[in-house]
Image: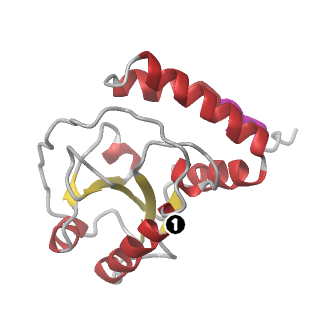
Amino acid sequence: MAEHHAHPAPRRDPIAIVPYREDWPAAFERERLRLEAALRQWLVGPVEHVGSTAVPGLPAKPIIDMLARVRDHGADVVPAMAAVGWAHAPEPGDAAARKWSFCFPDVAWRTHHLHVFEARSSRWPPLLAFRDHLRSHPADAAAYARVKAALAAADPHDRPRYRAGKAPFIEDLLHRLSPPAAD
């Protein structure tokens, strides 16, 4: 696997939670088609719409989160993504999670964020489980919206604090979804 060392530009867009927009599914679909073509030789399954913009009615940051799975983390997807205008945006923990992160059209002012995981990683299934649960449980979606709105209002520029503040809600919900271990 070729090593790609990128130093993404700092984020300039504030954390802003906006009402659900009916055009988010179409914005996802446009990029899904381009990404599936670019990643075709490595892709396992469809590119998925994840995150808050994938939950009808849920207020969210206006950034379309997407998930793709590839056969092998050794695949050289970075040049393929660059060829379709996506910027490599490494995040802490990407290597350990056997994933890459990309943004479109650029890192500082993104409209889309793609997480590309190795298919055998255990890190991507919770993203789908969380999305699916919120889609079918409006009370939990509303509670999550309140958490995100409060965190964004407290400091719209502190992304680590925002992510850390959401984590307990997400972890609690995922824990409730996990079946108890057999004795």
Q: Quarter-wise, where is residue 16 in the image? A: top left
Residue 82 falls left or right of residue 41:
left
- Quick one: SS at disc 1? helix
Q: Is residue 170 visible?
A: no
Residue 175 in magenta?
A: yes
Q: Nearer the viewer, residue 4 or 142?
A: 142
The N terminus lies in which quarter of the figure?
Answer: bottom left
Q: Is residue 11 left or right of residue 44?
A: left
Report the residue at 68% width, 55% height from top. 132
**Measuring 45% from the left and 73% from the top, which residue is drawn there?**
29
Residue occupying the point 69% across, 31% down? 143
Q: Is residue 144 left or right of residue 29?
A: right
What residue lies at 51% left-to-right and 49% top-to-bottom? Answer: 123
Residue 144 belongs to the span the image colors magenta: no
Q: Residues within 10 Å of mark 1 (few under 14, many from 20)?
A: some
Compared to residue 173, the image places residue 158 above or below, namely above
Badge 1 amino acid: Pro
**Colour scheme in use:** secondary structure
* Residue 9 x, y percent position in the rendering: 13, 41
**x, y percent for residue 127:** 56, 51
Extreme-right residue of the structure: 183
Q: Main secondary structure of the magenta part?
A: helix
Q: Nearer the viewer, residue 33 or 14?
A: 14
Decide which of 150, 90 is in the foreground and name it.
150
Q: Quadrant of the C terminus?
A: top right
Residues drawn in magenta = 172-178
Residue 54 sits in quarter:
bottom right
**Residue 85 shows up from this direction:** yes
Residue placed under numbered mark 1 in the picture: 25
> Residue farthest to the top?
154
